[in-house]
Image: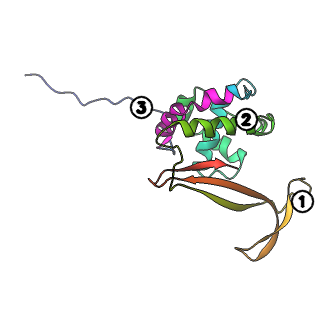
Amino acid sequence: MARLCKPEFKELSSFSNVGGAPVLRTLWDRFDLSLLLSQSGIFKVRGVATWVLAFLYVVGLINRCPSVNALATFFNKDGLLQRMLGIQKVTQSTLSRFLTGFSQWDTFNEKRTSRLQEDPDTALADGDVLALDDTHAPHPYAKGIPFLYWLYDSSNKVYTWAMNIVALHAVRSNGVEYPWSY
């Protein structure tokens, strides 16, 4: 008589706090965002492909990482993201240099919005809206940064040193929403 053995399961080290990362990667590829970064002249930073850093920033926004240091720490603990992106570690300085090291962000944004207009699921049409959002990003301990201003926060009824972020957000009548410009 044959005896059944207890099944053995392979120990997987891939875990993630961002369950939607594979879906986000599919959308990333659908809209050719990696190609658009390259066509805009935005290339590698310290040997890391810019699309990897850009994708990681988007994942960090979704995960509500409050700083590039928190984003680096988050990534360095996330096995699924490390496998998806093909790197094991990213530093805070690499992430910081990514955003400040290139001046072609306007070109990338134009290419991105053109690409979104080519796709029938995201192209704006009659009945769709571009919503204006005005948000303060407070930096109470960084008064010397040249793009910070002493702004009134009407939500909290106080003045604070902050950056005023103005964004256009596309809202389609079918429910699809995405950032248009900033």
Q: Label 1: few (<14), some or many (≥20) within 10 Å?
A: some
Q: How far apart are labels 1 and 3 at the CA level?
A: 49 Å
Residue 12 image position (x, y, % from top left): 44, 32
N-terminal-most mark, 1 or 3? 3
Amino acid bearing label 2:
Thr
> Nearer the viewer's eye, disc 1 or disc 3?
1
Q: Nearer the N terminus, badge 2 or badge 1?
A: 2
Residue bearing the label numbered 1: 143
Region of the chain picked out in magenta, as a range: 20-38
Helix, strand or loop at label 1? It is loop
How many residues crowd around disc 2 within 10 Å: few (fewer than 14), some, or many (20 or more)? some
User: Closer to the camera: disc 2 or disc 3?
Assistant: 2
Residue at image position (68%, 38%) is 110
Disc 3 target residue:
11
Q: Are marks 2 and 3 in contact (CB under 8 Å)?
A: no
69 or 159, nearer to the observer:
159
Asked whether residue 177 appears in the rendered view, the answer is: yes
SS for dot 2: helix
Of the two numbered discs 2 and 1 in the rendering, the one whose residue sits closer to the viewer: 2
Which three-letter amino acid code belongs to the residue tagged 3? Glu
The vertical placement of 136 against 147, above or below, is: below
Taking the image as shown, residue 155 lies to the left or right of residue 15, namely right
What residue sits right under mark 2 in the picture? 107
